[in-house]
Image (spheres, rainbow, N blue to C red):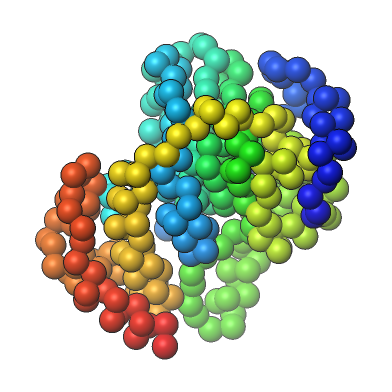
Amino acid sequence: MTQMNSDRLRKLIARRPAFPVYARDMPGALPVPAKREVHSLAKPDALDRWSEDVAGVRPSALAVGDNVITMFDIIGEDFWTGTGVTAKKVASQLRAIGDRPVEVQINSPGGDVFEGMAIYNVLREHPQSVNVKIMGIAASAASIIAMAGNTVEIGAASFLMIHNCWILTMGNRNDLRDMADWLEPFDQALVDVYAKRTGQKPADIAKWLDDETYMSGSTAISQGFADALLPADRLTFDEGAQARERDAKPARAAVHALIAQGHTRADARAMVRELRGMPNAASDSAMPNAGAADWSGLSGLIETLRS
C-alpha cells in the first residue's frame, strides 16, 4: 500500500457519510475456538513498537461519562501486570453502560487473537452504536476489536496493524501441519471481517495479513479501516504508563522465548517470576509506584535461548 496524496485523501474522506454511521452493514460474529488452551500471542515486534513509542498515549481529557471503555493494555489476561483486556471484563462494562451508545478508546499492541475475536463479538452485540477511537496503536487482536465500531477514528500519528494468527507451537511435521490447518479458518474469518468493513478485495486483505501490514492514520482511512482522524490536541502522553510498560517488556520477551523452547505458558511464567527474584511479581509490578525491576537473571536467559 502506498501513501495517498493529501488532495485525494481529503476527497476520499469527504465522500464518507458524516457521523454518526449506525446503519453500516457490519460483519457478523467471528468464530471463537473450542480449544481454549490454544492462545495466539502478540508478536514481539508489535510489543516492541508499542512499549517504545506509544504505550503512554492517552486522551488529553478522558471522557468523564460512564459510557467509555478504555483498552490501554494487552488483549487477554496479562500475566505480568495482572491486568489485560478480556471479553469478560468488556461484557461486564457493557452491562453497566446499558442500552446507550458506547465509546471504545484503544491503544494496544494486541495479544491473544482469540480473545480479541470474543471481545469483537461482545461489542457487536451491543444494541447501541459503538464509536472506536485509536489513540496510539491498534495492532493484531486490537485491530480486530476496532472493526466492531460503527465509526472508527484514528490519530494522524497512530497506527493499525493486521496479520495472520500467530502462535508458538512445537511438534513433528504432522503436528505442525494439523495446527496450520486448524488456524486457517480463523485467518479466513479475519479476511472476511476486514474486507466487509473496508470494501477491499479479500485477496488484497489476505496479502496484507500475510505481509503483516502497518498502516498510518491516513492510510487506514484511505483503505477503509477507519473513518476520520482524531484531532492531535485530543491526545497526550503518560510517561508513567510508558515506564511501567518498559519494565514489563523483558518478562514478556523471556516468556515468549521459553514457550518457543517447548515450555508451557504456566511453566514459563513461573520460571520468569523466579528469575526476577520476586515471589509475587505480578502484583508488585502492577502497583503504580513500583520501582524498577531487577532483570539481571532474565537478560542472560533471553540471550541463551535466542542463541
Q: How many marks?
A: 0
Tell me where residue 289 sits by quadrant: top left
Please name whichever residue, 187 or 17, is drawn nearer the observer in this view of the structure.
17
Vertical arrangement, residue 296 with respect to residue 13, above or below: below
Vertical arrangement, residue 239 with respect to residue 166, above or below: above
Q: Which residue is drawn at 83% across and 25% down?
A: 14
Q: Residue at x 73, y 49 (%)?
A: 191
Q: In the image, 38: left or right of 146? A: left
Residue 281 position, x and y percent, is 18, 57
Vertical arrangement, residue 151 with respect to residue 66, above or below: below
Q: In the image, 85: left or right of 149? A: left
Residue 159 in view:
yes
Q: Which residue lies furthest to the bottom in this view?
A: 307
Residue 93 position, x and y percent, is 40, 24
Q: Residue furthest top?
A: 99
Q: In which quarter of the image is the N terminus?
A: bottom right
Residue 291 position, x and y percent, is 17, 53
Residue 79 in view:
no
Q: In which quarter of the image is the C terminus?
A: bottom left
